[in-house]
Structure formats: C-alpha cells, structure tokens
Image: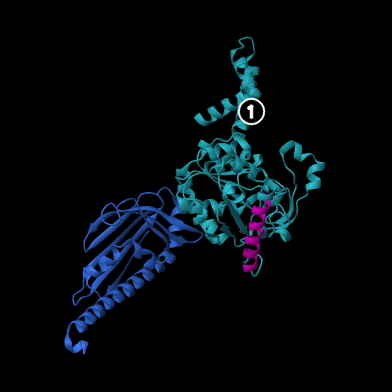
Amino acid sequence: MGTTETLAAKASQNGDSAAHDEEPGAAGDESANPFSRAVGRALGSVADLIASRLKADLDDRDPDYIREHLPLVWLLSSIWFRGEVRNLGNIPESGPVLMVGNHSGGNMTPDTQILTLAFSTYFGVERPYYQLAHNLVVASPVGQILRKYGTVSASPENAERALDSGAALLVYPGGDWEVHRSSWEGNTVDFGGRRGYVRLALKKKVPIVPVVSVGGQETALFLGRGNRLARGLGLDSLFRLKVLPVSIAPPWGLNVGDFLGHLPLPAKITIEVLPPIDLEEQFGPDPDIDEIHDYVTRVMQEALDALAAERRFPVIG
Amino acid sequence: MRISESVTVSAPPHLVWRFLAEPDNYLRFMSGVTRWEVVGDRRTGLGARYRMLLRIGAAEVGGLVEIVEFSEPKDMAWTSVTGVDQRGRWRIRDARDGRSRVEFRYAYGVAGGGIFGWLSEMVAAPTLGRHVRRTLHQLKRQVEHEQLRSEAERRRAAREASPAGAG
C-alpha cells in the first residue's frame, strides 16, 4: 500500500496522473454532489492504479516471494522445458552488471523464467536482480506478479536506477521485435538495430554479460511479426507496439497478437552465459557504440550458432 | 524430504573424518555438487561456512551453509544460512577390524513452498537419492584409496629403512 502511494505521488510529480490533480479538489469541493465526488474518487483510483502499474518501483521486488515460488518455477523449467543453464559463473560475483540477452518465445518468454530461476538459485534471492519488460507486460495482471520477481518497465530511468543500486540487470534489446520473429529465424540474434544497452553500459561503467538462449522460438509456430499491420493500426504510437504477431499455438490455433499468451510447446530451452565484456578494457577510453554493438551481437550469434548445432530435432532438442 | 544412506568403508573412522573435514575434497566426491567454496576465515570446524551448489533439474540449487556440529571423529552436521533449506549430517561409527560405517543424511525443502514445494521435493527425490548413493560410493572409493596409499607409503619407508629391503 505504501508503495502504491509512493508511486502515485511520483506519477503526480511527473505530471503523469491527472487524477492526482483532480482528487484534492473533488474531496474538498463541498458544493459538489455526492455522485460527482464518488465518480471523481473512482476515476482517481483507476488512474492511480494504472500509473502505479506502469511506474514500477525497484522496491517491489520481493525476495521472500521469489524464494517461496522457486519450486513452481523449478518444476515448470525442469519438467516442461527441460531447461539447462550453462556458465552462470561468468556473471561477476557482486556489483552491478548488465546482462544482455536474445529474446524468444512470444509473450510467454520461457527463457526469462528459466534464467531468473537459475540466477536466483545460483546467487541466492538476496542478490538484487531486475529485468526490463515492455510497459504492457508490466501493466498487465501478470505484471503484478512479475514485479515481485524484479521486473520493471523498460525505460532508461529504471535501467539506470537498477544499476545505480548495484543490481544485476537483464535487458532484451530486441524486445517485442525479436521475441515475435518467425520460427525459421529462431536461431538469429536480432536486436532491431537497438543500441541503447551499449550507451547504458558505457554511461554506468558496468560490464556487459551476453546471455544466449535457444529453443524459445520452438514453443509455437511463429509465422511473422505483422509489423506492417501494427503500423497501419497505429499500435506503435498508442502502445509502443511495433508488431502484431501471428502464430499457430495451443489452445487458440491461429493466434493473432498473442495478447492472452498461449500454451507453450515443451521445447528444450538451453541458455548459455558468455564471459563478461569490460568495455573500457576492450574498446579503450573512447569507445564506438556501433563497434561495441557489432561485437556483442557477433559473439552472441556465434554462441547461438553453436547451441543450435547441438540440437537434432525441433522441440525435442 | 529426508534422504539417508550408509556405506561401510574399509578404513578407520579417523581416516574417514580427515577426508570429510577437508573442504577441498567435496568437489571430488560429492555427486552433483558444482561448487563447494570456503566463505570467511574459518576453513573447517564448528562455524566454518561454505557456498555450495548442487545441480538438480534446470538449476544449480544451494546457498550458504554452516557447520553446526563438529564432533571428531563421529558427527559433522551443517545447516543452510541462505538459499534452499537444507541440513546435512555425516555419522561415522567404528565397524571394527579397521572399518567404518558412514551414514549420510540429507534433508531439504523450501519453507512456505506450499503444494508446489512438496511436489518439487518429491520430483527431486529420486535424483537426489542417486546423488547421495553415488556420493557415498565415491567417498568409500577415495578413502580406501587414501588408506592403500598410506599403507604403501609405510611399507616403502620400512623397506628403505631395513638393510634387506635396501639390498
């Protein structure tokens, strides 16, 4: 409750919540009739709720909740996805670190779930660990649960705050663009040209740890992003959605948008953590963003090619 | 969930104890363990802390453990400080004729895990049982090998010391 109040107050300060500007007036206006006051309060509450959902706070992360729910995540990851995470020891033992991953699996993203489980059991739930996610994910009902795991809405401010706090931060630069790529592009790293993660790492002077996963794009038959359709419908400007993906997935069959998620096929997910990249050490005092981006995506693609070569059959692994 | 297995080792208790008290040995004989590192200044004995991890299913599970009982050469027990709730215990008893009976007890769980906690304990039990049995077999093999080596060393020293052996 206190968190909600804090968040709402921040939203009000940022001018994001008109409800906060109206609420005092509604409460204090003695001449307004009771119906108007009730409507005003209701609208204010809805606006507060939306604002609080989008303005995720780092303090929403709840280590006890993560710990108590590790068995469920472990069961899903071990039995359904036969998850395997390699070389977690490549993540520095302490201090802020930017983990950069390729993203797969549509809106169900099993790779994130498995990596979060592995990180939490390897380093302990006490080590702060955050993940950036799309606004719509954080604002959704599922987002309320994800926030307890450390998921915050993707914004430069949240990313910087997480690293400033000394936490490990997981970002998927490809975001909705990469996660909805077609299944036949499943073994391709595609950040859609986004380089914000490099700027973030340089600004905060933190190492980049690339994380590569394979198998996520086999959890459904992803047919395409539908990016032209999304642009035509104006989803980009309204919801920061660059895609309207089309897939064939249970239980829906033809699945347009994947807004309600889907039942992922039990594809084997393998994740490999690559050695950390110290940007200053490797690229000198005047680093070039394009060069770093090219290097990071290249080492990730090479590792992904190696993981893909180990697979004999789709889904089975 | 608690798992308990035992094995008879052809070596006296003090030799088994010496092997178990050395933290460097744990990665060599404990099946499934991927990490066993000393944390802090105390290397062994009461209050010594280790960071341990055990690969089980999709994750390496473990955390910080602390030795809470250290009664040479009979009982050594540890309990978790962070991570998954766990208790481990070595019970070493004299089995006469220079042999020892070694029992390993391992209890684990997630407090507050509810039905899924119980289910995950059940699912993990067969794998953990195999790890515990393999651990004891590896312990037996390695301690008995140490015993053989020390006996061979003693014979070698005796041969070198006696004129007949030298000749």
Q: Nearer the viewer, residue A94 or B26?
A: A94
x, y (%) of residue A199? 64, 42
Magenta region includes residue B16: no
Residues rendered magenta in the picture: A293-310
Magenta residue check for A303: yes
Q: How many marks?
A: 1
Q: Which residue is mark 1?
A: A47
What residue lies at 54% left-to-right and 42% top-to-bottom? A150
Q: Give the cyan chain's letter.
A: A
Query: Of the residues shown, which amino acid type is indicated by label 1?
Result: Ala
Give the percent coordinates (x, y) of residue A31.
Answer: 63, 9
Colouring rule applied to residues: by chain
Judging from the image, what secondary structure is the residue with disc 1 in?
Answer: helix
- Find residue A211 and report its horizontal and vertical position in percent: 59, 54
Above or below, A89 against B142 in this view is: above
Q: Quadrant of the C terminus of chain B?
A: bottom left
Q: Is residue A254 left or right of residue B149?
A: right
Please tell me in which quadrant of the rendered image residue B149 appears: bottom left
The chain ID associated with circle 1 is A
Residue A207 visible: yes
Q: Colour of chain B?
A: blue
Please give left or right for residue A225 compared with residue B46 in the image.
right
Q: Residues within 10 Å of mark 1 (few under 14, many from 20)?
A: some
